[in-house]
């Protein structure tokens, strides 16, 4: 096994960072591996193997292995699109390793949408799913406000180990209970549509 120089180590760090960011922002494992291999090819790296699991990423170059642990996961399609753009520019030779690393770090530092915007978007999405599954105006309103409440609680789980899994589980329980309670207090005909609407955004 030959030792790697500083340039090769930087390249390994770069493709590992890109792979980690894809996985943390909701990319499937095959997309993680595809992104890393695309960047490795653009950087002129040979004999590269990348394996992604939900909680870790393994990168092997010329017998030298690196492991990255994934401690939190979420879904941010905007970041995924920007990371994909960086990886394709690296593949085409338009970015140097230094420029690509700076671009990825800028993406990671971007706070993204304000939480209030996400709360409103979740509520509208929940209401839309409720309507799609045959909900009445009453069930639509219940799904809207229940969905907004679920998303408002998301920051409480953001920094926990397995936070996304816990948030999805608790969000589903809260959504179902609130919709059932609302149906008991003021029947709005289709409680099932309200429940589906409230929890469906958790699955997307």
Image: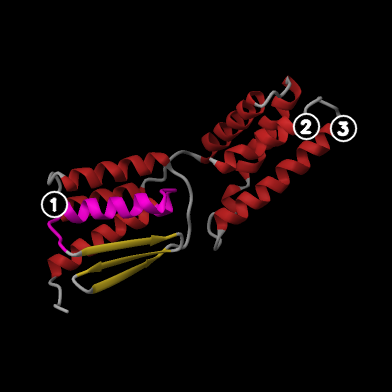
For the record, the magenta segment spans: 23-46
Q: Position of residue 152 (x, y in %)?
A: 61, 43
Mark number displayed over residue 191? 2
Q: Is residue 135 visible?
A: yes
Mark 1 or mark 2, earlier in chain: 1
Q: In 3D space, how far apart are the residues under numbered discs 2 and 3 (Cα atoms)?
A: 12 Å
Q: Closer to the camera, 200 or 99? A: 200
Residue linked to disc 3: 185
Residue linked to disc 1: 96
**Quadrant hosting residue 139:** top right
Secondary element type, mark 2: helix
Residue at coordinates 87% horizontally, 34% vertically from top-left? 184
Residue at coordinates 29% horizontally, 50% vertically from top-left? 35
Residue 80 within the magenta-colored segment of the rendering:
no
Mark 3 or mark 1, earlier in chain: 1
**Quadrant hosting residue 125:** top right
Prevalent SS, magenta region: helix
Q: How many marks?
A: 3
Q: Name above or below for residue 96 compared with residue 56.
A: above
Where, quadrant-wise, is the N terminus in this rendering? bottom left
Q: Name above or below for residue 29 compared with residue 194.
A: below
Q: Residues within 10 Å of mark 2 (few under 14, many from 20)?
A: many
Question: Are the residues flagged by discs 2 and 3 in contact, CB closer than 8 Å?
Answer: no
Judged by depth in the image, the label closer to the viewer, 1 or 2, is 2
Q: Residues within 10 Å of mark 3 (few under 14, many from 20)?
A: few
Q: Name above or below for residue 71 compared with residue 114.
A: below
Q: Closer to the camera, 154 or 30? A: 30
Secondary element type, mark 1: loop
State left or right for residue 174 relative to residue 73: right
């Amino acid at each position: 096994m030959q030792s790697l120089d500083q340039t090769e180590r930087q390249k390994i760090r770069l493709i590992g960072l890109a792979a980690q960011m894809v996985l943390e922002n909701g990319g499937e494992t095959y997309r993680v591996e595809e992104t890393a291999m695309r960047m490795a090819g653009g950087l002129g790296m040979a004999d590269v193997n990348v394996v992604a699991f939900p909680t870790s990423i393994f990168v092997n170059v010329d017998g030298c292995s690196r492991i990255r642990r994934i401690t939190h996961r979420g879904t941010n399609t905007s970041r995924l699109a920007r990371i994909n753009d960086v990886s394709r520019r690296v593949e085409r030779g338009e970015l140097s390793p230094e420029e690509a690393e700076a671009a990825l770090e800028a993406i990671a530092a971007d706070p993204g949408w304000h939480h209030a915007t996400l709360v409103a978007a979740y509520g509208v999405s929940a209401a839309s799913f409720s309507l799609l599954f045959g909900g009445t105006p009453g069930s639509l309103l219940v799904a809207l406000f229940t969905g907004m409440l679920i998303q408002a609680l998301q920051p409480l789980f953001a920094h926990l180990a397995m936070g996304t899994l816990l948030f999805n589980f608790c969000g589903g329980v809260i959504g179902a209970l609130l919709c059932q309670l609302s149906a008991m207090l003021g029947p709005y005909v289709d409680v099932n549509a309200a429940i589906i609407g409230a929890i469906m955004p958790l699955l997307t």
